[in-house]
Structures are given as C-alpha cells and as structure tokens.
Image (spheres, coloured by chain):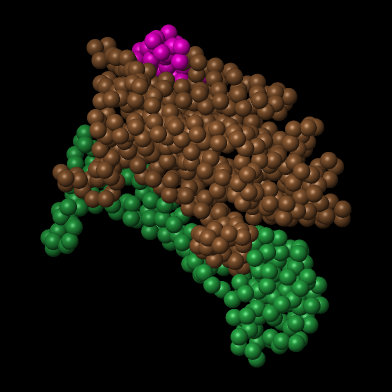
Chain colours: A brown, B green
Amino acid sequence: MADIDYGGDGPEPLNDALITGNNNTYKSIENQITRLIFNQRTHPKSWLFVFVVGFLLLNLLMMAMTWLLYKGVGIWGINIPCAWGFDIINFVWWIGIGHAGTLISAILLLLRQQWRNSINRFAEAMTLFAVACAGIYPLFHTGRPWVAFYWLGPIGPNILGLWPQFRSPLVWDVFAVSTYASVSLLFWFVGLIPDLATLRDKTENKALKVLFGMISMGWRGSARHWERYETAYLILAGLSTPLVLSVHTIVSFDFAVGIVPGWHTTIFPPYFVAGAVYAGFAMVLTLAIPIRAWYGLKNQITMRHLDWMAKVMLTTGLIVFYGYVMEVFYGWYSGNQFEWAMILNRFKGPYAPFYWALVFCNGIAPQILWSPKLRRNLVVLFVVAQIVSIGMWLERYIIIPVSLTRDFLPSSWGYYTPSVWDLGMYAGTIGLFIVLMFLFIRFMPIINIFEMKDLLARMHHAHHAEDDHTATAPGSAHAALANAEE
Amino acid sequence: MNSSLYGLAAEFDDPDKILEAVRKMKAAGYRQMDAYSPFPIHGMTDALDCHDPKVPWLVFGMGIFGTINGYFLEYMTSTPVLDHLPRFVRLLPGMNEMSYPMNVGGRPFHSWPNFIPVAFETTILFAALGAVVGMLLLNGLPKPYHPIFNAPRFELVSQDKFVLCIETADPKFDYEATWQFLQSLGPDVVSEVAR
C-alpha cells in the first residue's frame, strides 16, 4: 500500500477528490481497510498505550459503580439545592457527542454529501459508545438501577401501582434516549452487513469465516437485495434525522420546562442541538486525526474531509456562541431581576472562572479556524477539538449547578463541589469509551468498504463523463477532475 | 435438462459491463436472472426491473402502529378512561392495573400536548424496526445456504467481481444457447452453478 500512502513525507494534496491518489482500485481500498482486522501487526504501539490507559480508567468506573451501589448516591457531591450534578452534566455531554455520528450518517446522506462515506462508520460507532456512556448516568443516579426500569420504563406499574409520569420531560428522555440507542444500533448494523460479507469471503480462518458468515446473515450482494437495502437505508436516515433533533430537544426540555432562572428559555432546543453537533464533530476529529495517521488511511480520510469537518465545527460553534449572547441579552431585556441576577452571577459569582473559560473555549478559541492555514494544520486542529470538548463540558456545568445553587430564595442558596467519586465515574466513562472504540478499530471495518467502492466507481464514471461531457453523478464531477489533475 | 444445475454464471470485472450484459439479456428475452455485486450498481434496478415498493409501505404501517401504541399506552395509564368503559373491561387480564390517573398540579388527565414526545419516539422506533426487519425478511435473510454460493470464485463478488446468473428456471434457458450468449457478452469467465 506504499504507493498510495502519504505517510509523512511531502505535503498532503488538498483538492476535492474524496479518495486521493491515482492507483486506487476496489481491491486496494478494501485491503487498506481490512488490513486492520486481518493483519493484527498493523496496530502500532500507540494503540496499546491508549488502550491500556482506557482499560485502567474502565476499572476505575467499575470501582466507582460498585461503591455507588453499596453506599448509595450520597458518595457524590449532590445535595439540596443541587440535586443534579455530574450525573446529568456528563449525561448531556456524552449524548451530545453521539449526535455528530448520526448527523454524519443520516443528515449528510440525505443531503447527498458523499464525503460522509469515509467517516460515517466510525462516527456511528462513536455514537453507540457515547450513548452507552451516557446511559450509565441516569440509570445509576437512581441508586437502584435494577428497579429503575419500573420507575422509568413502560414495563408495568411499580410496587405502588403507579405508572411513569408521562407529563414529565424526564420520562420523555427515557423514551428518546432508548429509541436513539436502538435506532443507532440498527443503522450501524445495517451498514455493516455487506462489509461483514466481505470479511467472511476474505478471511482464511475457518472460525472467523463462520462467525462473519453468521453475522452477515448470508448476504450475497444480489441486485434485488441491494434495491431493498438502499431503500431501507435511506428511510432509516430519514427517520434518524428528526430523531436526533428530537433527542437533544427533549434533553433540553429537562431544563427548559423547569422554572429555574437560566433554564427556562425557549432558545434551549436549537442551541442544545447545535452544541451537540459541535461537541460531536470535535470528537470525530479527535478520533480521525490519529486513526488516519496510524493506519495509512490518508488517501481515504483526506485533508478535504478534515477541512470540511473543521468548517462544520466552526459554524455550529458560532450558533452556540450566539446562544450565549442571547442568554445574556434575554437576562437583561426580560427586566426580570432573577434572570439578570443569574447572568451577573455567571459573570462575577463563585463560578465565574468556569464561565469565562467556557466563553474562551467555545467562543474565542475556535475562531482561529477561520484561517485556512491553521485549519489545515493538524496539530492546531486537534488542539482546538480538545478545547471544544472541554468547552462543551463546561457549558453543561454552567447551566446546571450555577442555576441550581442560586435560585429565587437566598436562604436556599448553596455551592456544588463534585466528590472524588464523581470525578472517578467521569474518568471511568471516558475509559469505557476508549476501550470500546479501540476494540472496534481492531476488530471491525472502520470505514464503510462498500460505500467507498461505490464512491470510487462514481469517480471513475465522472472521470469518463468529463471527456464526452455527458451527465455525471451529482457532486463528483469536479472531484474526479481534481483527482486527475493531481 | 440437468436438475442439479441452478444456472449459469458469468463473471465481469466492471459494473458497466455487467449492466450492459443485463440489458442485452433482457433484450434477448431472458427473465429469471440476478446480478451479484460488491456494491449497488446505479441503474441495475431499472435494468432488472426489480423495483419493490413494499419496504416504504411497511415502514409507514409500522410507524402508524408505533404512534397508536405509544399514545394508547399514555392514554390508558394516565386517564380514568376505564371508568367510562363497560365494567367487564376491568376484569380482562391486566386491565385493572392499567389505569392509575394522577392529578398533577391540576392539569387535565388527558394532557395531550405532553403525550406527543413519547408517541413520536415510539413512531420512530417501530418505523425503524419495520425498515430493518422488513428489508431482511423480504430479502429472505438470514439465509445461510443459497445455490449461488456454489458458483466458482463467488467469494470475489463481495470484493471486486460482478456476477450475472441466469437460472435454469427461465423458460428461455437452453444450456448450449445460453452458454454461447453469455460468452458473447464479454465476461471473464462463464461457469455452471450447482444447486
């Protein structure tokens, strides 16, 4: 694969070709991706290093959860007035990260953005794992997760004969997040079926052949099957799009339906959704930049992909920052003393350093992405992605304890400090995410093989069509042209 | 005719070639055939005339089913509807536990705007299940064995080869003539597919 790997020396080409290099064939693309599974020696030492760090953190999560189940939620820093602390902050943070995966796989598919093909598979995996991390928090903050299903789900009445309160956004949240997890899993699995068939046919190992054969369910690439497959896939994308918007809207309702100053605003749903995409793209970049470098996938996840992701991050970041500005404006313009006191408390109160860090991380730091030169510097881009992740975490921190500890009555004010178990559980879910993601990199195709082949076929087509000026596949004519010039 | 024969398979190395071959086969009057490829080929559905509108309808039906289910769950559990139904309904299994209306802050029992989010989510859930399960069942998957897997080098179809299989079930199938015709379409190789 040396002839198409831009590993290190010479500048990487930046053009609109979605697969760079001239020697790509269906075979070479497939080999590049499946090498990660069939040749376990491909994985560098850095894989092991990050995995071990993740695994240690995962053990911390186990300890934190065991201690939580033994002692109860009293080990956390939560108390009245701040009964929601790290659990909901981290829940919203993780769910938000997951949303970029759905945006890439569903919305960009509906918009016929073919550049999604290189990144949708691991972005979808990221969604699944982020939702798994998110799900831990609401489940375990009940203290007794084994009965939480009766309190939250439509399993049946609980021991008092009561059903879940369907007028509460918290119950909507249960339905939204569990539907989101299920649909994301279906979407990911459907996308995997043809690739699993490829793995089944490629492997020499008998046991793996049987395993992949069972999961791919006897997929044989029949034209009749492809027709239904593409229809179903497109419909799933069409269903996921309103779903992903509804999930974060409902998450924002958890706050917006309450009357606490700083929560009770109509701007929350759009600004939460934009924030989710913003944080999610930061995480996709965090994963994509090392993966393409480690595994020689620079011709499939090109500089153009990174450039576009940086632009999406910049755009959604501006929407989020607009939300912050509107919060301040609303606090002043409402003429409501509680709203204005909340804003002043953010500016000058005990949590002011966090607020100004938030403004820096989400509002100021990403603005350097306006410069094309800095945007294409991968070190800068990676650092900005980390700053955005921190910023989006701080945003939830500012919304939740800062408002809860300063509501209407000064006698009920307080101060929230997370305990060591809060921090341990947060670090632990990061470990869980790393472990799942790194196992995925090792044992599943991280790029959608059949869609990349389809893309290559379209690029060949567009290339031929350029010569005799006939119609081409949408959006790929200039891509192939740029590829030819390179 | 040889009953142990499933059909004849022609292997191509380019999606355009197989598309052209399918069009020529259709023009020559063959009907019972299928094209196998590593990725969906643009235009193949029209060439084979195998458009199937069932999946979208199934999704629509399942979506409606999900809406009704979600809303029904909320309506039955949150309103005193059982009081207005005939008494025997309460005696049906599970019905007595079903209804437990709670007065929350004086809001109406049937506070329908608050019931929309859950009904929406169940709509999406059931529709998505309908899309995936429907697609798999209509495709006859999972199916561990299919005669086409007997075609030589069929494992390359999920990689970079394209196979057109004309089945013996086709009324126009004639071993010699069909073999000759397939050869004339310019494939890499033509081979028998055992049943």
> In the image shown, does A309 or A90 lie closer to the viewer?
A90
Q: Residue at x 21, y 36 (%)?
A: B104
Residue at the outermost top position: A348
Q: Residue at x 62, y 67 (%)?
A: A222
> In the image shown, does A66 or B14 lie closer to the viewer?
A66
Q: Quadrant of residue A3?
A: top right
Q: Is residue A219 left or right of residue A86?
A: right
Residue A344: x %, y % from top left: 41, 10
Q: Is residue A150 left or right of residue A479?
A: left
Q: Residue at x 75, y 82 (%)?
A: B179
Q: Quadrant of residue A417?
A: top left
Residue at the outermost right position: A467
Q: Quadrant of the C terminus of chain A?
A: top right
Q: Does any portion of residue B127 appear in the rendered image?
A: yes
Magenta stretch, main secondary structure, is: helix
Q: Is residue A196 above or below residue A426?
A: below
Residue A314 is a magenta residue: no
Q: Is residue A106 above or below residue A385?
A: below
The range drawn in magenta is A325-354
> In the image shown, does B180 or B111 lie closer to the viewer?
B180
Q: Is residue B27 above or below residue A219?
A: below
Q: Residue at x 67, y 28 (%)?
A: A378
Residue A210: x %, y % from top left: 52, 63
Q: Is residue A254 left or right of residue B157?
A: left
Circle count: 0
Q: Does any portion of residue B85 appear in the rendered image?
A: no
Residue at the outermost bottom position: B1
Residue A350 is a magenta residue: yes
Residue B71: x %, y % from top left: 32, 51
